[in-house]
Image: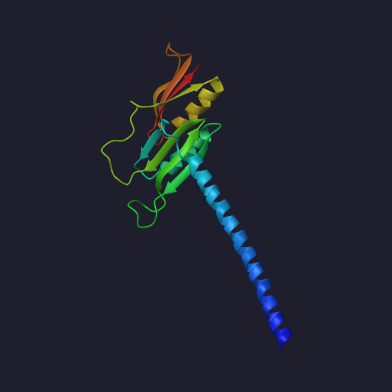
Amino acid sequence: MKKCTLIIILASMLLNCSSLKQNAELNALRTELDSLKNAKTQTSNTAPGQITTFLTFQENNAEEAMNFYVGLFDNSRIVDIQRYGKGGPAKEGTIMVARFELDGSKFACSDSYITHDWTFTPGVSILIDCTTEDEIEKLFAKLAVNGNVLMPLNNYGFSSKFAFVEDQFGISWQLNLE
């Protein structure tokens, strides 16, 4: 009987040690996960004082536009996406706010669930200084698809080649060949 009791005590101690080791590993994993979440938050947030162009879309097409723009420019990426959830004020899955970079320039966008009396205007545009004729022609061709050419590619005297185009999402772009 004493041997059985001793074996039971030893087995119990062994299980407790194993359980403690698993708890320690689980706590270490939780700490690492929290650290990764904090690192993501720090890299996805804009630094205080940072100027970011914010685009408000009213047709639930912010994500489509963002993906289109990121695909146009080298060194571009989506930094962070926050979506509206179920039961929120907007359609579930639409963009509450997304942050992205276009060749190092910071942008943010959202799908507005509020219908505004305004939309995008050519009075505010994004200027791209192109370094080659091939670059300006490719950007012009892609941005003009289903868009509106405000000034076709040409030499207007202030630049060897220039174009002003409103893309399919309503964003205006000035393309300039340096």
Residue sitting at the far left: 117
Residue 79 visible somewhere in the drawing: no
Left or right of 74, for residue 45: left
User: For the point 53% across and 34% down, which residue is it?
Assistant: 76
Q: Position of residue 44 (x, y in %)?
A: 48, 41
Residue 118 visible somewhere in the drawing: yes
Q: Is residue 27 above or below residue 97?
A: below
Quarter-of-image position of residue 155? top left
Q: Is residue 150 above or below residue 117?
A: above
Residue sitting at the far front: 2
Residue sitting at the far right: 3
Q: Position of residue 154 (x, y in %)?
A: 45, 17
Q: Is residue 159 above or below residue 15?
A: above
| Depth order, front residue of 157/129 | 129
Quarter-of-image position of residue 108? top left
**What's the coloring here?**
rainbow
User: For the point 67% across and 78% down, which residue is it?
Assistant: 9
Residue sitting at the far top: 157
Left or right of 116, for residue 72: right
Q: Position of residue 4 (x, y in %)?
A: 71, 85
Q: Position of residue 121 (x, y in %)?
A: 33, 30
| Depth order, front residue of 132/75 | 75
User: For the point 66% across and 68% down, which residue is it?
Assistant: 17
